[in-house]
Image (cartoon, helix red, strand yellow):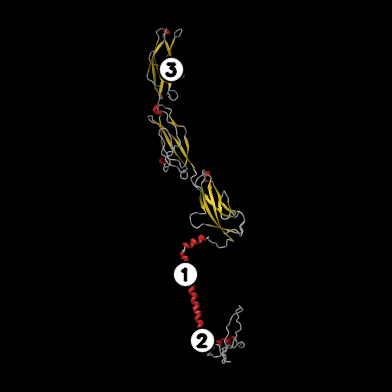
Amino acid sequence: MEAGGECFPKQSPIPENSPETEVALFRIRDRDTGDNGRMTCSIQDDLPFVLKPSEENFYTLVTNGALDRESQAEYNITITVTDLGTPRLKTQHHLTVTVSDVNDNAPAFSQTTYTLRVRENNSPALHIGSVSATDRDSGANAQVTYSLLPPHDPQLPLGSLVSINADNGQLFALRSLDFEALQAFEFRVGAADRGSPALSSQALVRVLVADANDNAPFVLYPLQNGSAPCTELVPRAAEAGYLVAKVVAVDGDSGQNAWLSYQLLKATEPGLFGVWAHNGEVRTARPLSERDAVKHRLLVLVRDHGEPPLSASVTLHVLLVDGFSQPYLPLPDAAAAEARADPLTVYLVVALASVSSLFLFSVLVFVAVRLCRRRRAASGGGCSVPEGPFPGHLVDVSGTGTLSHSYQYEVCLTEGSGTNEFKFLKPIFPNILNQDLRSKSEPNPTFRNS
């Protein structure tokens, strides 16, 4: 007895994702008769294939569901034909089925989010990182190309910041990046295969710009803009630790590149002032004395903690005063500069001095002329006015509103003597009312010849 058959493969390979696809057609035969000629045909149980009888002694091998090439690309099938005789005889036929690829897998990135770091002031065309995606398919269906996707923020100039190599996914920098202008940005990259139709996927890329120490400290106070320096006033009664001023500075960098420390480099009188290293406060190191100079000049250094460190310097002017009520005295160079910058003040002072001098000169001339006229009147001699008493003036000398007694003197010129002289007689105490009447009727004093 014998059992045997023939296999007629339909196609090879078999496309994946193709359920109930005919793989091969079988014909079996046995030369015996009766039960010895009857046959059964079977395959392994763990395969995604089944044998279906079609006509007498013909079987069709078909797929039992969709095949997945990515799970198993090849199957080795053993077809066993057994008769029903005693003893049973069997024969086997081996068939290899290859599964062909279908573009059913999109490229997959190794990470959903990439975080890349690049130091600022980088050179253009610097390689800053890569993205990677793989495709489980084969052939053209597994070939991946990369691209930059439009950013969500339309104001982000992505095209001028980074580029990507379409073949290998290498990124990020077309120009030098500035941490102070752009500290971080993000965008999406796409990976597409070359299948038909093409499948694609996306990944997020976040770029962090690392700070470099490229900014020196900038002093906000005191201003160093070339104008007249600001002078700090310190009373001489100040004790040790008196706050004179505070140097205020900032740094555009970040982290330790922006940590600032302060140091007193130079002082007119060393040991009199000190600077706190962490906050820039300038304080007196000891009590002030009368022997200390009035004006002091301090040079303060501000330094960051970057590598290498950058620094800036600032000059403070300090003026010691006896008290804050004392008027502020500008420094000589500042006063001279102010005088040169304001010539109108000088002109006004000169004009005022000229007017004052002219007024004083006019007053002196007027007084001189009056004195000259009196001398000429006195040199004429004799008494040309009638005799009579000189009325005294009513003067309030007590401050209480009452008038003092009025005194009257008799004055005469002596004739026959070589000189003219005044003769003072005893005072007369007239009634105030009569004195007023007499003063109105006799306005001139009475001269009497002795």
Mark 2–mark 3 Cα distance, whole angstroms, equals: 164 Å
Q: Quadrant of residue 130?
A: top left
Kind of residue at badge 1? Ala
Distance between the Cα atoms at labels 1 and 2?
Answer: 40 Å
Which residue position is annotated with label 2?
Answer: 377
Residue type, mark 3 in image: Ile
- Mark nearer the viewer, 2 or 3: 2
Expressed as whole percent of the image width and height from the top left, the position of residue 139 reads 40, 27
The mark found on residue 234 in the picture is none
In terms of sequence position, does the residue under pointer 1 or pointer 2 come before the other?
A: 1
What type is the residue that disc 2 sits on? Ala
SS at badge 3: strand
Residue 245 location (% of width, % of height): 56, 54
Query: Above or below — where is 147 with respect to 385?
Result: above
Looking at the image, which is closer to me, 435 or 281? 281
Dots 1, 2 in contact, CB < 8 A: no
